[in-house]
Image (cartoon, rainbow, N blue to C red):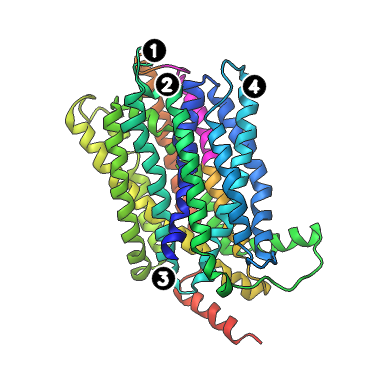
Amino acid sequence: MKLAFGVGAVASGVKTSAFDYFLLLFYSQVVGLDARLVGFAILVALVFDAISDPLVGYWSDNLRSRWGRRHPFMYISAIPVALSFFLLWNPPADASQHVLFWYLLVLAVTIRTAITFFETPSSALVPELTKDYDERTSLFSLRVFFGWFGGNVMSVMMFFLLFPLLASEAFPDGRFNPDAYQVYGIVGSLVIFVAILVCALGTHSNIAHLEPAPPARQMTLKRIFGEIFETLSERSFVALFASALLGAVASGVAASLSYYFLTYFWSFSEIQTGVILLGTFVAAGIGLVLAPIVSRTIGKKRGAMIVGLIAFVGSPMPIVLRLIGVLPENGEPFVFWFVLITNIVDIGLIICFQILFFSMVADLVEQSEVKTGRRSEGVFTATVTFIRKSVQGLGVLTASFVLALAAFPVGGDTSDVSETAIWRLGALYVPTVLILWLAMIAAISAYKIDRTSHEINLEKLRTRP
């Protein structure tokens, strides 16, 4: 069961990796859509998410069916997510900027809504599967590990297989060949479909042991939104949400510009970039092992603050050292190994931080139930889904404006981009992500739930008449 639950995150990992790393690069540099329009399309989709995500979460908290509250949503999401992912990488040929914008916008809304129907109910299973403070961290460790694993396998496939194989006279650098992304869409859609079904079928036997739906009651829009607002007004949730949203924007900027830095700033080849991506598997293992240890020894909140501060301040350091002229010139072996090692350590710490954050969200369920009398796993988990999408929404939008301010050319290969534009890209990127990440650490300090308060909440619920 635990393995099937973790494997489900492969679907979200593939979709998230695609939006984080390839979407802006594909639509701006390969298809030729203005980077600002790419960012704006994802931002508009985020507005839809702000409405649909909590509604889906609330719906899954209250659904009454013979398959429980969560599994019907998980099953029906498989085909829409897979199909919309495939279409995303097959835009109409020779289309105008106007047509491309609307094509991207419609598919972005579709896939992000469809993935909510899977990700929110499936992740909401954690507080139901275990109430143990540390076991929740272990479950989310598997979930986050498989999410990173699935997305990274697809990225490695691109850089080790598709980009080199599809390099041609017309496209000497396979990263700019649209055929590579079409194959990516086919493989990714199949992986997503299988991962969703594995998770749904693998956890199906647990339905009888999960929390039942609340008693039937008359539902009105006023009551629905009133209960959602009451649930999300918890002070610790507000702190966690603000922190996570700031971190999501920063992570979105970093992810969206990652391949710009690997391709243009560091001048790494497809194979070198592929090796760096392979390092992410090691990083995912670090996060998987480290997060439960941190949870048991120093607690989730303190651990998240310490690990996050080290990770986020250290993340842009290689770029800073290049900007001030400390690192050798590109092409020197030391540069590649330095970036590889620092990237592994940094991503491992970021994965650890993410696991601790998701586990902190799970602990909000009992805190809210004590105050409201309702279990709201779906609503709280929907906020996690929304925050993940904010990485692609606000993050991609911010990244697109960083590119615009740097006067970075659209559709240019590595020989068409000036040294000045590359330097401006680094100089604008570093303060942007540092300000966002430090604000995130400050916000998380207001979260109040620890091991002791969690146990108190469980005791209150056990003794409640």
Would you call the spot at circle 4 few (<14 residues within 10 Å), some (14-19), or many (20 or more)?
some
The percent coordinates of residue 99 (x first, y second) are 64, 22
- Indicate the quadrant containing the C terminus: top left, top right, bottom left or bottom right: bottom right
- Secondary structure beneath label 4: helix
Measure the alpha-carbon separation of dots 4 and 2.
Answer: 21 Å
> Residue 170: which numbered mark, if any?
1
Q: Using the image, determine if residue 262 lies above or below residue 293.
A: above
Find residue 319 and report its horizontal and vertical position in percent: 32, 33
Q: Earlier in the sequence, mark 3 or mark 2?
A: 3
Q: Hey, what amino acid is under mark 3?
A: Asp
Considering only order in the chain, which callout, 4 or 3, is on the residue closer to the N terminus? 4
Residue depicted at 30% across the width and 35% down the height: 274
Does residue 89 sit above or below 444 in this rendering? above
Q: In the rendered structure, which disc, 1 or 4, sits on the residue that comes first in sequence?
A: 4
**Residue under numbered circle 3:** 134
The magenta stretch spans residue 410: yes
Residue interval drawn in magenta: 392-412
Disc 2 on helix, strand or loop? loop
Query: Where does label 4 land, which residue?
Result: 99
Query: Closer to the observer: label 3 or label 1?
Result: 1
Pointer 2: what residue? 177
The image quarter in which residue 335 lies: top left
Q: Of 196 and 256, which appears nearest the observer?
A: 196
Find numbered disc 3 in the image and state the secondary structure of the residue it sits on. Answer: helix
Say whether marks 4 and 2 touch (CB < 8 Å): no
Depth check: 370 or 157 in front?
A: 157
Residue, x 43% and y 38% (percent of image)? 255
Q: Nearer the viewer, mark 1 or mark 4?
A: 1
